[in-house]
Image: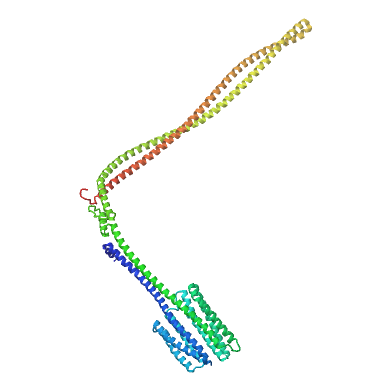
Amino acid sequence: MKDAAMAYMDKLRIGTRFALLGVLAVLLVAVPTYFYVDQAVRITAVAHREAQGTAPVQSVLAVVRLTQQHRGLSALVLGGDTSAGGQRSTKQAEADAAYGAMVDEVAARAGEGPPLAAVRQAAAEWKRVAADVAAGRLTRSQSFAAHTALVRQLLTSLDLLADEFSLSLDPDLDSYQLIQAVMVALPPLTEDLARARGLGSGMLAAAQATPDDRLALALQVRSAQDRLALMVAAFEKAARANPELGSRVGSPMRQAIELATQATALADAQIIRSAVLGYDGKAYFSLFTRAIDAQFQVNAIAMQTLDQLLASRARGHLRHLVGTLVLMAGLAAAGALLAVAAARSITRQLGGEPAEVVAIARAVSQGDLSSDIAVRPGSESSIVAAMAAMQESLLQVVSAVRRSSDNIATGSSQIASGNADLSQRTELQASNLQQTAASMDQLADTVRNNSNAAHEANQLATAASEVAARGGEVVGQVVATIAEITEASRKIADIIGVIDGIAFQTNILALNAAVEAARAGEQGRGFAVVASEVRSLAQRSANAAKEIKSLITDSVEKVETGSRQAGDAGRTMDEVVAQVQRVSQLMAGISSATQQQSGDIGSVSSAVGQLDQVTQQNSALVEQAAAAAASLKQQAEQLVEAVRAFRLRPGM
């Protein structure tokens, strides 16, 4: 169902579619508009109906006023005041005319219904009561009760009229409170004042009052005061809601309140609380009558104001309704014009009907570029014109792609072949680099071993240098010791020399002693023997000293020779220490150079490893490039096949 509707819509022209949318919009707006207009008409009709109800209400209030006045005059006459008979007859005639006018007014405004039936019944009852009073068939209390019942029936008619003309539920605060004041509170207030007037007039005319009469009057006065308070409260609310209303009704309202207050105060002072009823009944009647007339005057002004308010509201509702309808009609016309303009604008922007545009787009999407797209005059910026330009561009592009796709396929084949050769050479290069990397690793191991050996030789050279240094120090100590021995040998030689001198001198002395002993003869023979022995000992000591000296001298010479040789050995050890230290320094340099060489070879080995990795990566990239070239070749072949799907114009 949905697909069928969409297919049907697709066949329609744009103008027809907008027309259907307009009809749908009218239908969518018509229903709420109908309800709104119906509600607005109802509100306007209610306002007009309320305005029509003020005249019947005023006619009933006029009848209530005359009935109340007739009740008071009848109380005077029936109470013994024959001077009020003429006024009562005149008031009866006025009431007869008012009752007739009331029935006619209610019949004309309300038609048949409960209000008309009520006022007709009240008019019939009035004729009966008026006839009985005129014939004197009723007592003062009976007349008062009959008039009161008649007024009560008239007030009921007021309620029926208020309901009939929708005055009971007025929607605006000012008019609602005004209705409450002049149609709900004021009529019962006038009735309470009128009943107080009738009761008090009768008591003053009779110059006597029973406790029950005083109680009845007191209840009427209290009720009147309460009604007055209700009326004032309702009027104040209306005045606050509508200050203009308060300014128009305020002055007579204040006067009516003042007179009502004076009347109730007079009844309280002169009758209810007074032991002697000596106040003039006509003055009492006149004050209450003026108070009641003031209430009715307020009612008349307020009803006139209410009539104006209701009429103004009805006209306002009517103006608002008409304005709304005119606005809606204008909006509808503007919408129709906008729809026509939109339809023409869309058609101009499309360059044709949507079905035509769809057909062109479908042909292009299917690869048919051979047809000519007709562009309407004035539609150079339309979608159809853009599609024509697009078709022309596609023709050029597809033609160029078709010419180039074969070249791309050939070139991609050559690239794939070259990439395959490059991949083989790259793999060979990667293999060579792997061998080079392995050789560099072996060389690095060898250099690392040499570095370790050089490091150990350096440590040995350092130890040898330390040993040589210690040997040099020992040789120095030996040279010093030999020097000390040489010095001791010299001292010994000196001592031996001294001993040799002593032996020589001893020999000389022994020789001299022998000479002296020879001179002494026999006496000196023993001394000569001793001298001879001393000389022999001195000679042996001298010989021993000479031998020792010779040995010491020889030892000194050998010690000096040893000292020279030890000094030569010390110098030689110094040279050895220096050479060993030089060798240690050279070995340290060799060790450092070997370590640096090992690090350089490690760097070279790492670089070769990285070169190997790069070569392998290049090999992988070459393989990827070969695969990409093969894929490019395949895609080029697919492109050739894809381009062949387009149908071009002959010669392209």
Answer with the quarter of the image where residue 476 lies: top right
Compared to residue 266, the image places residue 581 above or below, namely above
Between 560 and 1, which is closer to the camera in this rendering?
1
Q: Residue 195's spot in the image, x, y percent?
A: 52, 86
Q: Residue 607's spot in the image, x, y percent?
A: 41, 37
Answer with the quarter of the image where residue 470 lies: top right
Q: Residue furthest left?
A: 650
**Residue 218 shows up from this direction:** yes
Between 456 and 10, which is closer to the camera in this rendering?
10
Compared to residue 241, the image places residue 143 above or below, namely below
- Name the colouring of the figure: rainbow
Would you say 285 lies left or right of 364 here?
right
Compared to residue 422, the image places residue 125 above or below, namely below
Compared to residue 344, the image places residue 563 above or below, namely above
* Quadrant showing the N terminus: bottom left
Q: Residue 243's spot in the image, x, y percent?
A: 49, 72
Between 618 and 82, which is closer to the camera in this rendering?
82
Q: Residue 323's spot in the image, x, y percent?
A: 38, 69
